[in-house]
Image (tube, rainbow, N blue to C red):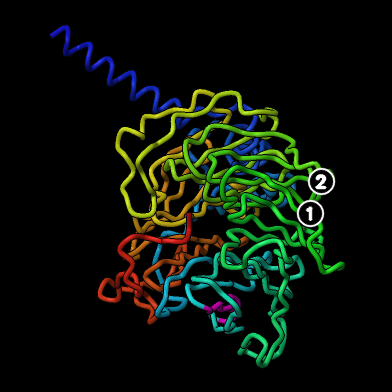
Amino acid sequence: MRGVRRGARGEASRKADRELDRFAMANEVFHLTRARSEPCHRTRGAASARRRRPFSTFGLVSARESGRTGGAGFSPADRAYVGSRHIPTKGPWGVDEVDSEAYVSQFSADGSLLVAGFRGSRIRVYNADRGWRIHKDISCRSLQWTVSDIALSPDQQFLAYASLSPIVHIVNVKSSGKESHANVNEIHEGLDFTGDEHDDEDFGIFSVKFSKDGKEVVIGNNERSIYVYDLAANKVSVRIRAHTADVNAVTFADESDNVLYSGSDDSLCKVWDTRCLAGEKSAGILTGHLDGVTFIDSRGDGRYFISNCKDQRIKLWDIRKMSSVVRVRPVRIVDWDYRWMPFPSEAHHFKHPDDQSLATYRGHSVLQTLIRCYFSPMHSTGQRYIYTGSSDKSVHIYDVVSGKTVERLSWHSSVIRDCTWHPCYPTLITSSWDGYVARWEASGDDDGPSMLVADEQRASPYFQPYGDPFMM
């Protein structure tokens, strides 16, 4: 019995370690998230001084309309609290169905447009304000395998699309024609990121972003590098050998364009000062992941960001904890390839000896392709949630503060590589390898004609038994 108790105690200890790893949260980000997504003190006092239960939307509106808030309207935190209680879990309804895998999807900043990219040479832009009608049907140019990433310019006029090739193309999504065939009826301007230095067949782009002022395009590639393209000068202005493996993700920290984050297959997240990139020296390094980083999303405040990883974890970071060098190397997950192998069960218990992250979120699956994760919108939820696609055919939504899974959206019959939450409304779009672009809402008509049902499910339209061979 003593041995049994010791074994049970050991298992309890391991479980406690896992719980601590998952739910530990720095006080500052804990209080910041709650302050942005829960009723403000004035509204709390007006609604009920003794209330312990969650505030209802009716109670908040009643307090406002009866004048108990002193004549003030909802604060941004009040609005986010109401919005965060209406998670888009109903559905899905069909937005589109094509004969190839959906790889990427993205709402415009104002939510009026939805862009989706598919394997092959197709991108579609939908008008979210007009019943999801196709606003622009784009036939792409010079693609290798798939559309790997898309980015809308800050003014929402231009769309940049990339693939596993050295050229990023720019197309005008506000032009009058619905059909856009590259260099047939519309010009898709090409930005060449290689010059004469590389063999085009060996160069692939995994991530593309416009700067916030729209003057530059930044990419991460399989050359272990970050490139910056100056649109006015029409040339690459900076080349940085940023990592020791593929750079799968780049993004700007905030509206200033002064700070850039990157994530790589070398398991590292790095922070860059865009004002001094020429020396190829990062501003700092963040360690904690055990395998390749697949995506990064910034909170937009120049301080916090999240990363998704092949170690099956999302991590939350504070760049103030970064170091100048890698102090300790992690335990590597050997003899494993995420493209066609299940994640080793013993690796779920591995920990980085110098984990600098603030919190870890687990439950989703990152297999076969570079799956993406995001903060939920500031306007409607106060960024209370983290949501991610998953190779288990679901979207997982985590509470930032508790780390718990609050919802799991399941209908698709293949990998959900990307998903996007409307910036203002409780609408979430999923793009899956089953060829469907689907819409989830907080409420809706279950009998609507576009409601997707079980007999419409299908596997990937392109039979691919070994995952995504090019998305390393």
Residue at point 73%, 48% (across, down)? 240
Answer yes or no: do the residues labelled 2 and 1 have beta carbons within 8 Å?
A: yes
Magenta span of residues = 121-130
Residue 278 is labelled as 2
> Left of 463 or right of it: where is 140?
right
Q: Quadrant of the N terminus?
A: top left
Where 350 falls versus 88 (above or below)? above
Main SS of the magenta part reads strand
Q: Which residue is mark 1?
A: 238
Q: Nearer the viewer, residue 377 or 49?
A: 377
Kindly identify the amino acid type of the residue bearing the numbered disc 2. Ala
- Is residue 101 shown in magenta? no
Residue pictured at 62% horizontal, 32% vertical: 31
Identify the element where label 1 is drawn: strand
- Direction from residue 447 to residue 248 in the image, left or right: right
Q: Residue 356 sits in which quadrant?
A: top right
SS assignment at label 2: loop
Neighbourhood count class around disc 1 (C-alpha, 10 Å): few under 14, some 14–19, many 20 upward: some
Viewer-proximal residue among 304 and 40: 304
- Using the rendered view, name the quadrant where residue 93 is placed: bottom left
Residue 14 on image: x %, y %:
34, 22
Residue 366: image location, x then y, percent: 41, 50
Which residue is at the front of the view, 421 or 351?
351
Residue in the image at 57% along x and 83% along y: 139
State the mark number for residue 210. Answer: none
Q: Is residue 62 visible?
A: no
Res. 307 image quadrant? top right
